[in-house]
Image: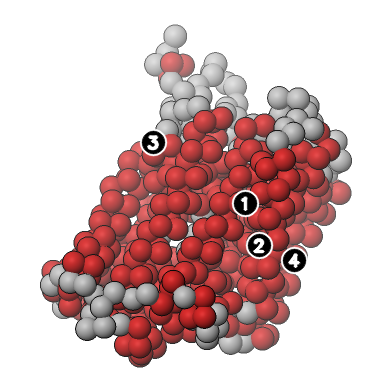
Amino acid sequence: MTTDALLPGATAAGQEHHKLAGKLGPTAIVFMVVAAAAPLTVVAGTFPIGIAAGNGAAFPASYIVCTAVLLLFAVGFTTMARHIRGAGAFYTYIAHGFGRHAGLGSAFLALLSYTAVQVGVYGYIGATLNDLVTSHGGPAVPWYLYALVMMAVVAMLGYRHIELSGKVLGVLLICEVGIVMVVNIAVIGHGGGDAGLSSAALHPSEFFSGAPGIALIFALAGYIGFEATAVFRDEARDPARTIPRATYAALLLIGGFYALSSWAMVSAWGDDDAVSTATNSPATMLTETATRYVGSVAGDLVQIFLVTSLFAALLSFHNVLTRYIFALGNTRALPRRCGRSHVRHASPYIASVVQTISALVVLVACVLAGLDPVLQVFTWFVGAASVGIVILMTLTSAAVVVYFRRTKFDTRRWHTLIAPSLGFIGLALLSVMTAVNLPLLVGGSDTLAAIIGVLLAGAFLGGAAVAVLRPHAGRQDSDSDSEKEISR
């Protein structure tokens, strides 16, 4: 017996490997999905926009609303995870609820959405690294060179066993959350600015002032990636327990961290000054807050950890995308080779290479088109991804209700009907708001918003077309303890 035969995922020589393996606990998976949310990036980039363009000093309440809606979504989502053993998350759950055509449509929409947000982050990290180097006297180089270096590192880590990525993400996440918490504690310890600690988020009239819909959209964008807990099912130590625990923990940590940090930022400046600062100096608001309350070293650390935050998001999205590709390869929606796992690392190594190539192609297209890395690549692509992912969550909530009403595998009304239905209503409203305000998310262009809408719809229809043209694509083995296959 060889050494490789003893490792997770190894099989006899000459056989193909189509299984992933790992012993990830809730903590490791939480690191994966919270890192994808890029907390420091949200604090530095989204908070000022939400305060300035949304509902001002009451913006922190938007995170409480979004967390409540997503907790309702998580009830049905985690209940589904206990019954459905597939690791395709959105795609698998929607397929079990609405059938193979809707499932594959959702899979291709997910691939487009997550690829878009990943490429957007490549643009942001390239520009951020260039600014960091030049601000310290270094040479100015094209942003895409930094992006390519980051892509190579992500590709290396994504090729290897998932536990290596988990350890890297754990360290990076602690750093970025740690510096923000230091600033939060300093602001609270000082009692806020001259006006004291803000109470605007506690007053409904303040929340509904300005543009609360815009505030909710930008707040919701900060949760992208939390739902990916189910994608790591095959690599979890005890999926039935680990996935639900990780989902709730990630959601509560993200929502609590954002609500606290946005409230601290508003309090640091005062209700009125926070709005004016967010409007006039959005890019430097966090750095100025850190410098003002902690010191210049904290301001420098914010700039450094912003880079590591973006890198952590890239690695997380890469891992999510490769597991979608892996699942689609194993169900023959994509070439079967995409569903192979590495003998030694038990990783989706071919899917990882495919994902790296796809991101490279899109990034090169952006460079050739001469797009600005932040104002266009990051803004446009993340805006498109936000619409796609909210739609996927909405469809998943509906699929949970349909699945359990049809199969009766779980008859608990709160878990399978009431909470998922309430989550569906909340997410449907957010989907409409996001779609209507898409032009704002992509720089105010109605034409560009229309093009993005067509691309998102085309991805879904393309997946459905694959289901029609390839009758065996997307069919899965026993994904439920009681249900043996998707027959539609």
Residue 247 visible within the image: yes
- Residue at 48% across / 80% down in the picture? 206
- First-in-chain label (4 vs 2): 2
Q: CA distance from mark 4 to mark 2?
A: 22 Å
Dot 2: element:
helix
Please tell me which of labels 2 and 3 falls first in the chain: 3
The amino acid sitting under disc 3 is: Glu
Sequence order check, earlier mark of 3 and 4: 3
Residue type at mark 2: give it. Gly
| SS for dot 1 | helix
How far across and down, in percent of the image, does residue 225 sit? 51, 54
Question: In which image quadrant can residue 299 be found?
Answer: bottom left
Residue drawn at the location 42% of the way across and 33% of the way down:
25
Question: Given the image, on which type of amino acid does mark 1 rest?
Answer: Phe
Residue 305 picture location, percent across and down: 27, 62
Rate crowding at label 4 as few (under 14), some (14 to 19) or many (20 or more) other CA atoms within 10 Å: some
Considering depth in this image, is 11 or 77 the residue closer to the camera?
A: 77
Q: Depth check: 26 or 6 in front? A: 26
Q: Position of residue 432 (x, y in %)?
A: 69, 71
Q: Residues within 10 Å of mark 1 (few under 14, many from 20)?
A: many
Q: Are marks 2 and 1 in contact (CB under 8 Å)?
A: yes
Badge number at residue 426 = 2
Residue at which label 3 appears: 163
Q: Tell me which corner region of the image, top left, top right, bottom left or bottom right, holds residue 42.
A: bottom left
Residue pointed to by mark 4: 457
Q: Residue 346: x and y, percent? A: 48, 30
Callout 1–callout 4 Cβ contact below 8 Å: no
